[in-house]
Amino acid sequence: MGPVSPSECLFCRIAGRGIETAVLYEDERAMGFRDINPKAPVHLLVIPKEHIESLLACGEEQKGILGHLLWVANRLADAENLARDGYRVVLNVGTYGGQTVPHLHVHLLGGRSFGWPPG
Ligand code: 5GP
Ligand code: ZN
């Protein structure tokens, strides 16, 4: 996975409102919206507005945003009524992790039970 210029990056374009997307959560650092190809009754993505390629690209400086993305995911889980039954949060990282969009994103999945281990 090579470096991607933010202007060519799908999630940078969503963050910059260059692609029309219904936004469920937004603040100065992060954004939450529905996955276009949902794998569960509720499938949301939480992204940093800043372009960060993946968890692999995160160092000490990104500790704050990483915590913030999880906090946003939990808020959205509550808003989507997932608190009672639970939910799953996933970060796909790199090739073996199954990452297809090279802009850091947290998957929030809920509304059904999930198997373990993942496929
Ligand atoms: P990954 O496979 O990189 O972990 O997850 C990328 C996710 O982005 C996939 O679940 C895919 O369905 C979703 N996705 C790809 N393109 C778009 C898009 O244009 N809009 C939205 N909302 N989701 C997208
Ligand atoms: Zn990006």
Image: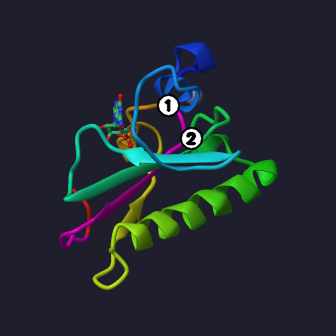
| Pointer 2 residue | 54
Viewer-proximal residue among 13 and 117? 13
Q: What stretch is highlighted in magenta?
A: 103-116
Residue 86: percent from the left, percent from the top?
33, 79
Specify whether 18 is left or right of 63. Answer: left
Q: Does the residue labelled 1 lie within 8 Å of ligand 2?
A: yes
Query: Which label belongs to residue 59?
Result: none
Picture quadrant of residue 101: top left
User: Identity of the amino acid at label 2?
Assistant: Ser
The secondary structure making up most of the magenta span is loop
Q: In this rendered view, identify the residue nearer to me: 75 or 4.
A: 75
Q: Is residue 109 magenta?
A: yes
Query: Alpha-carbon neighbours of circle 1 within 10 Å: few (<14), some, or many (≥20)?
Result: many
The image quarter in which residue 108 lies:
bottom left
Q: Position of residue 50 (x, y in %)?
A: 68, 35
- Residue 109's x, y, as percent? 31, 61
Q: Do the residues labelled 2 and 1 touch (CB within 8 Å)?
A: yes
